Amino acid sequence: MSASQIDAKEEFLSKLYDDYHYKIPKFQRPFSWTEENFNDLIDDLTDAYDVGREAHGTLLDEEDELDKSTLDAYEPYFLGSIILNDGDDSGERSDIIDGQQRLTSLAILIAVLRDIVENEARANSLGGLIYEESDPIKGKSETVRLEIRGRDREFFDEHVLARGATEDAPDPETGESEPEQNILQAIETFREELTEWQDEEDGDLGDFATYLTLRVVMVRISTNSLSSAFRLFNVTNARGMPLNNADLLKSENLSHIDDDEKREEYQQTWEDMEEEVGNEGLERFIGFMRHIIVKEKSQKSVYDEFKDRVFPEDKGFRGAKFVDYLETVFDVHRHRIYNAELDSVSHSEEVYYHNLVSLMRDFYPSDEWMVALIQFDAKFEDESALLSFVELLERRLTVDWLTGSSNTGRYSRVYELLREIERASTPEDVLSLSVLTEDIDDESEAFENALDRSNFYRKGNYQWPKYILMRINGERFDNTNSKVEYGSNVTIEHILPQTPNNDYWLSRFDDEHWRDDWTDRMGNLVPLDGRKNYKVSNKPFNAKYDEYFKKKSDFPLVTELEEHDEWTPDHLEERHERLKEEAKEIWLS
């Protein structure tokens, strides 16, 4: 490649893994995708495959041979772009500058498929995409397609690359580091989700593997130097890039307003919203619109869905009607979510709504709940009913979240709810829907097991402990008197330090196996307002409370510690059980 050359090409996974060799540079962060990412990835891929299978049939014929005409009929599934450095400083392999989480996760998925497909030839082919043993007869040396970071390489080789390695993979909690745990979690999630999909959707794993390798596409962008790769990464990830969905839809809709004066008025409305929340913020609200209108998972870009589906189905929606709808979504979000306001209700209801929605807004891991709230409020405009709806919705989605539902799964739940809201005549019709309450009692054991996780501190990419503890804290707080705003500065700290190194802690918690099992559990965690102070994290309990916890927080979950003169295993276990019961009272009662 000549100087300053950039090469970009669409490649199917079979070619991406078969024709190229990659490595993850030392400066890259470790493998950090978590269970929710893996769930979303496999759900997206199986859903896209199911769409093609339903429309065109299976890819493999009765003789288990590829039907090329059917393959061509399947819509390719775009999985984003990867940015690589192929310059002299990268050596014989391409340095992955952007895309390592996807490439690593896909390699693990290929390994899982390799170990569970029944066809031996197909298993060998899948295995060859990620690893080939040396073959002296053919003069080939050992080939590892994806070389991950040095400290995790041996673990990855043993549990992913080796044939059959994913069949008996250890429990994710046994991993000695976060990347090891994430690798094992990916294996567990992919195996469980594929098995469930195979049983429930009559899925053929061999056919799906063919779809994965021959119909899933990524854009491979290669540059000739590290500095060029970084510049490209910054450009492609820059805020406010031109011609995003918001820009395209702005042009599309304003151009369909014929009256010059009216068009200028609507342009001002659009730009006022854009000035308030930015281009990306407005694109988010357009995405909310898409969810509310289409009520099912997206198969295309937001712009293409409006252009190819929404506008043809409602020819009057393009233009002023689109901007009016966007303004409604925008205004409801500002009033009900950003400001978290109820009107014309009792003071206690107003405060409770504000505190609950503020907590969800700042700490809930995704925004599917906002879509349901916006549609409910836009249709019914009933203040007291809105509070009841939010309470039911928060309970439903939190139970789903902690019992293993992915972001994709929770959106499916919301799509069902959106359809019911559209059909409902009164807010009471919605509040009595089974979709908001069904099976919650049946999930009590799974919910309690989630609260008991020994790695609770790390679950959900550290979002579980923050949301659950702050929600319990909110229920302890007098929610009927004072509105509370937490912001984004809340951190989670351990009472018993993660790595105790003084006599106070080591003498009271002398069983290392017990510490490993309990240090990251809910009962040992407290929320603090502000950055952590590692200098005092190992001080004895009383000093740690006075010099650290007391200064950092007046949360009830923290101030209750003042009643203790010391911290022992019994105190930790008792607090854990108490918090668990409070959580069950909030979400299961």
Image (tube, rainbow, N blue to C red):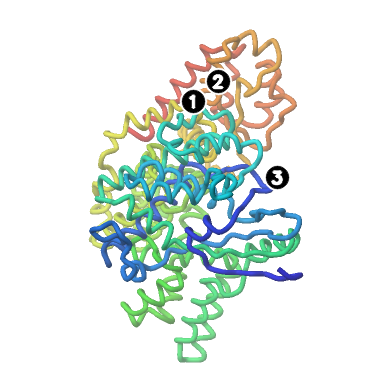
What's the residue type where badge 1 is placed? Ser
Instruction: Report, in whole angstroms, how far the alpha carbon at label 3 lies from the one at label 2.
Output: 29 Å
Instruction: Report, in whole angstroms, how far the alpha carbon at label 2 lies from the one at label 1.
Output: 8 Å
> Can residue 425 be seen here?
yes
* Relative image position of residue 357 (x, y in whole percent): 47, 47
Above or below — where is 101 with respect to 85?
Answer: above
Q: Do the residues labelled 2 and 1 touch (CB within 8 Å)?
A: yes
Q: Which residue is drawn at 37% across and 78% down?
A: 311
* Front disc: 3 or 2: 3
Q: Do the residues labelled 3 and 1 touch (CB within 8 Å)?
A: no
Residue topped by disc 3? 26
* Relative image position of residue 26 (x, y in whole percent): 70, 45
Q: Which residue is drawn at 48% across and 49% down?
A: 128
Above or below — where is 532 with respect to 11?
Answer: above
Say few, some or many: other residues with alpha carbon within 10 Å of mark 1 (under 14 / 14 to 19 / 20 or more): some
N-term-proximal mark, 3 vs 1:
3
* Relative image position of residue 439 (x, y in whole percent): 26, 39
Q: Nearer the viewer, residue 408 or 386?
A: 408
Residue topped by disc 1? 454
Q: In which quarter of the image is residue 72?
A: bottom left
| Drawn side of residue 59 relative to residue 136, left or right | left
Residue topped by disc 2? 516
* Front disc: 3 or 1: 3
